[in-house]
Amino acid sequence: MSLRDEFLRLLREDEVFRLAVIGLLGISDIQSALRQLVDAVGRLVDGQEALARNQSVMMEVLNKVLEAVQRLTENEEKLWENQNKLLEENNKIWQEIRALREGQEAMRIDIGKLWEEVRRINENIEKLWEENNRINQNIERLWQENNKIWREIRSIRRTLEHVTLSIEEEANDVVQYFLRERGIAVETRPTHLNTKYEFDIYGSNGQLTIVGEAKIRAGPSTVRRVVEKIDNAVKAMPDKFPGKIIKVIYCLRAMPGAIEEANRLGIWFLESGRERNSPSI
């Protein structure tokens, strides 16, 4: 081995030798500087590693921030979309509000017209109530008059009934009187033969039947109706009319033409206790 090789080996392997050589060479200060440099580099490396770690964390944070920003952007777009929709809805709402206001104004006008109509109707109702009150007053007066009329009618009816009864009694008395004057004894009276036929004057002795009506007034039509009634009764109940049938009319007053019609139809006509013609007995 050469001296050079041995020297280099000792420098590598023998620290004491190496330090002695360094001391001899005057490089101890350099060694100290190198150590400081190595320490600084080490700290720098450690700082770079920490910086790398921080950078990684920062990247993660940055990624999260970017994601958040992305979400915010998306939300902002949705917000813009929603805002546009809200604006559209708001426009529709304002349109509806304007339409409602227009409708409200039209309704106000219509309500004003309705109130005016109601006022006129109320005026008409008041007039109708006044008219109704007048009508009720008139109706009340009419009812009073009607009651008076009915009282008069009842009075007249009672009077007529009395008069009729009196006429019937008078008629039968006069008929029987003139029959007795002729030597005929037949008792006559008002008689109901059935529910359909009744006569004010009726009587029979088997050979002669007297039948007729008593009237206050008698005209030609009265004479014809009495004759028709008697003829129908004779056809319906011939057994009630035996012998010769004498048809008679008694009245208090004979109307023009009554006696002539009685003569034409063969009716015994009596007026106020007098014979106006003679029967063929």
Image: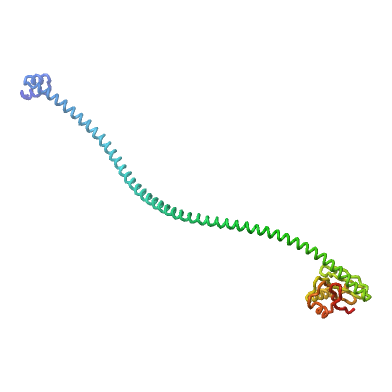
Above or below, 54 relative to 90: above
Quadrant of the image occupied by residue 63: top left
Residue at 57% x, 55% y is 126
Pick out the residue farthest to the bottom.
264
Whether 85 is drawn above or below 18: the answer is below
Q: Position of residue 189 (x, y in %)?
A: 88, 69
Where residue 22 sits: x, y (%)? 8, 21
Residue for point 46% across, 55% down? 109
* Residue found farthest to the right: 183
Foreground residue among 164 and 102: 164
Q: Is residue 161 above or below residue 45?
A: below
Q: How is the image coloured?
A: rainbow
Residue 199 location, quadrant:
bottom right
State the image coordinates of residue 235 (x, y, percent, origin top left): 84, 75
User: In this view of the protein, which residue sits in the foreground, 106 or 160?
Assistant: 160
- x, y percent for residue 156: 78, 64
